[in-house]
Image: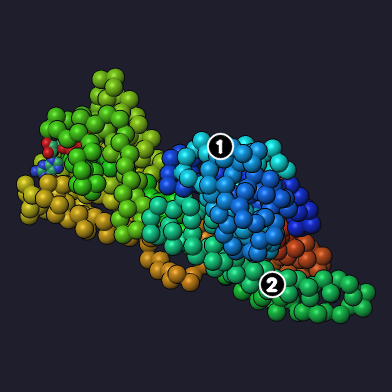
């Protein structure tokens, strides 16, 4: 049982202190490109731009969402480049502040010089994620949505992009808001009861209160159960190809990648280093690890390789244990694998069935890296392994972020405490504290409740310019 906890003190006034300074950063990747975009945001955006921009009219007089052609110069004589300036007036910009985007020719030298000029005006360099942080502070998006911005940028498969978009569109946030409102509603009755404790009036009876808390808990549990799926679509799946030497691990890797990535040879002990490659199967990112065949070896390099194979097994989400029709299954090795990773995460694959098609040997899948037989079945198994039976529509709220998962778990614990207090007929004060804490935990997800540490942790991981 978790001990009865003190309310967590959190800063709920994040939006009182809005940033005053104006920031600048390159928003496009550093390097040569067709164009580069420099982003400026803050109160002095227009004024500062006007100091270096020479066009038909002043940016400070421009209306929102207009584009202006002109030249950039430090002294009005020597021009650095001709540019397009896009103007966004508060609150209708990404950050919610007055913002400017300067599109230049895509030379790193040009953008560097323009940023230097701007830094000589009333502007400072942006910190990582600071534009998005401002969007959050100005209520343009909530915290879960801000985190989704990073996920959208980082997503490399269809599924991860969809998941991140779903979060950016506020599907998770709406769900959390909903649960939090129900909770606030329920706890307001308890608090009302505390205010009128002298008169002994009950504003909500214990059964009703417990029922409401249970309903919220059910919703939280539902969300928590999406995490394994959410994590898979966001981060991908680590799959280790493991087995004795020569069973065809590298051949299977090559077959899946459709290229001759790893050296294949009939000499056992070919692969020494762990080879890592990524592949998208039906929109899901699979990170494949081809490992050194595991056997007893005295040879230094091979021994190290085998050590690494074992570590890879520990770190993976799924292990494909491979053996082939020419040698018996190494049950000793398989049992060892079961000590490194849970049994239900292991797929046993029998390879080289082209040599012996009608085998009675036992396996989960029967494949041939040579002919490709059984590979579809292997992919099916892999997907089943990672998703279980979960089916989610695009409208379903999905948890894919560990921070959110932890907040939900915390909220759940507080609700458990509250229910226990109810069943033990403890005073409303105890119940109220736990309900408050649960509210705060849910609030942390969307940033209704937050600390500087939480914010720094999140935005530190962004790139500069986002
Ligand atoms: N007939 C047949 N031969 C295969 C198949 N898969 C692999 N081989 C052969 O088996 C031998 C070993 O293949 P590898 O892919 O190097 O095996 P490995 O498991 O990576 O071996 P190590 O790296 O030494 O642990 C090679 O000669 C392959 O051509 C298959 O499905 N059918
Ligand atoms: Mg190999």
Query: Viewer-proximal residue, 239 or 256?
Result: 256
Marks 1/2 in contact by CB < 8 Å: the verdict is no
Up-down: is 395 above or below 284? below
Q: Residue at x 27, y 29 (%)?
A: 272
Secondary structure beneath disc 2? helix
What residue lies at 48% left-to-right and 56% top-to-bottom? Answer: 152
- Disc number lying in front (1 or 2): 1
**Res. 169 visible in picture:** yes
Q: Residue 124: give x, y in percent of width and height.
A: 68, 41
- Is ligand 2 closer than 8 angstroms to the Cβ of mark 2? no
Q: Which residue is mark 1?
A: 112
Above or below residue 420? Residue 232 is above
Q: Residue at x 63, y 60 (%)?
A: 88
**In which quadrant is the N terminus drawn?**
bottom right
| Badge 1 or badge 2: first in the primary sequence | 1
C-alpha separation, residue under disc 1 versus residue under disc 2: 48 Å
Q: Which mark is residue 456?
A: none
| Quarter of image, res 244 | top left
Tell me the SS state at disc 1: helix
Determine which of the numbered discs, if any, sits on residue 181 in the image: 2
């Amino acid at each position: 049982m978790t001990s009865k906890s003190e309310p967590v003190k959190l800063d709920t006034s994040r939006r009182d202190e809005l940033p005053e300074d104006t920031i600048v950063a390159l928003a496009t990747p550093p390097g040569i490109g067709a164009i580069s975009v420099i982003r400026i945001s803050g109160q002095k955006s227009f004024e500062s731009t006007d100091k270096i921009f020479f066009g038909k009219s002043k940016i400070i007089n421009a209306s929102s969402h207009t584009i202006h052609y002109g030249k950039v110069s430090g002294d009005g004589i020597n021009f650095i480049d001709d540019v397009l300036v896009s103007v966004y007036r508060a609150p209708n910009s990404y950050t919610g502040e007055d913002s400017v985007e300067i599109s230049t020719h895509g030379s790193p030298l040009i953008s560097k010089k323009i940023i230097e000029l701007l830094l000589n005006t009333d502007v400072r360099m942006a910190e990582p994620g600071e534009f998005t942080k401002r969007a959050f502070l100005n209520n343009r998006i909530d915290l879960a949505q801000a985190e989704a911005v990073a996920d959208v940028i980082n997503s490399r498969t269809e599924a991860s992009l969809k998941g991140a978009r779903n979060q950016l569109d506020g599907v998770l946030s709406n769900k959390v808001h909903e649960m939090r409102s129900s909770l606030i509603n329920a706890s307001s009755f308890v608090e009302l009861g505390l205010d009128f404790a002298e008169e002994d009036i009950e504003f909500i009876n214990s059964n009703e209160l417990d029922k409401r808390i249970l309903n919220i808990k059910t919703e939280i549990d539902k969300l928590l159960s999406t995490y394994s799926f959410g994590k898979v679509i966001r981060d991908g799946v680590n799959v280790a190809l493991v087995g004795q030497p020569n069973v065809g691990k590298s051949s299977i890797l090559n077959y899946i990648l459709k290229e001759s990535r790893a050296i294949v040879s009939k000499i056992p002990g070919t692969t020494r280093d762990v080879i890592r490659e990524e592949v998208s199967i039906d929109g899901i990112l699979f990170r494949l690890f081809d490992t050194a065949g595991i056997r007893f070896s005295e040879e230094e390099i091979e021994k190290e390789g085998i050590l690494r194979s074992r570590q890879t097994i520990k770190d993976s989400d799924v292990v494909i244990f491979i053996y082939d029709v020419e040698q018996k299954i190494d049950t000793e090795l398989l049992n060892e694998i079961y000590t490194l990773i849970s049994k239900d995460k292991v797929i046993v694959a029998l390879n080289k069935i082209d040599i012996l098609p009608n085998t009675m040997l036992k396996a989960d899948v029967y494949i041939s890296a040579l002919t490709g037989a059984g590979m579809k079945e292997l992919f099916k198994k892999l997907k089943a392994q990672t998703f279980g039976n979960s089916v989610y529509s695009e409208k379903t709220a999905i948890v894919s972020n560990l921070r959110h998962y932890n907040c939900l778990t915390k909220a759940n614990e507080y609700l458990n405490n509250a229910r226990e207090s109810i069943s033990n007929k403890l005073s409303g004060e105890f119940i109220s504290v736990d309900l408050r804490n649960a509210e705060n935990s849910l609030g942390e997800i969307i940033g209704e409740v937050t600390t500087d540490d939480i914010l720094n942790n999140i935005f530190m991981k962004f790139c500069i310019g986002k």
